[in-house]
Image: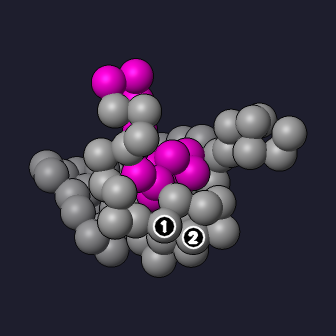
Amino acid sequence: MKVSKENLKKLKANFLGYIEGEKVDQFLDCYDINFAAGHWFAGDFADRFATGGYNTDVDSCITEQIKRVSHAVIKSIEFHEAVFI
């Protein structure tokens, strides 16, 4: 994270209140904040209550999950180690 007197002034000028859309990307770039999503974010959302997943219409293979994260314009992705084992 990059913080300076100059970019702190931008908080009031450019990022006051609730921000969304492209403004979020501008905020993350301005302060050099990295953002990632886990591959499970784009899967079938299985948990201990629904081990088969809540969204069974979604192809939950890892390559499709990566495509969906990319489509959401998220630049980084985290993986469970089990994906690689």
Q: Are marks 1 and 2 in contact (CB under 8 Å)?
A: yes
Q: CA distance from mark 1 to mark 2?
A: 7 Å
Residue 73 appears in view? no
Dot 2, how many residues are within 10 Å of its Cα: few (below 14), some (14-19), or many (20+)?
Answer: some
Residue 63 within the magenta-colored segment of the rendering: no
Residue positioned 60% across, 61% down in the render: 61
Q: Which residue of the protein is positioned furthest toward the top in this rendering?
A: 48
Q: Which mark is residue 59?
A: 1
- Which corner quadrant of the image does residue 1 belong to? top right
Q: Secondary structure at mark 2?
A: helix
| 1 or 2: tag closer to the N-terminus | 1
Q: Amino acid at mark 1?
A: Asp
53 sits to left or right of 4: left
Magenta residues (range) = 37-49
Residue positioned 75% across, 36% down in the render: 82
Q: Nearer the viewer, residue 6 or 56?
A: 56
Q: Nearer the viewer, residue 12 or 43?
A: 43
85 sits to left or right of 30: right
Q: Residue 70 in the image: x percent, y percent?
A: 54, 72
Residue 42 within the magenta-colored segment of the rendering: yes
Which of pointers 1 and 2 indicates the residue nearer the eye?
A: 1
Residue positioned 68% across, 37% down in the render: 80
Q: Which residue of the protein is positioned furthest toward the right in this rendering?
A: 85
Q: Which mark is residue 64?
A: 2
Query: Is 33 placed above or below 42 here?
Result: above
User: Which of the colour schemes (rainbow, by chain, secondary structure, one colour) is used?
Assistant: one colour
Residue 19 appears in view? yes
Q: Amino acid at mark 2?
A: Glu
Q: Residue 4 in the image: x percent, y percent?
A: 54, 44
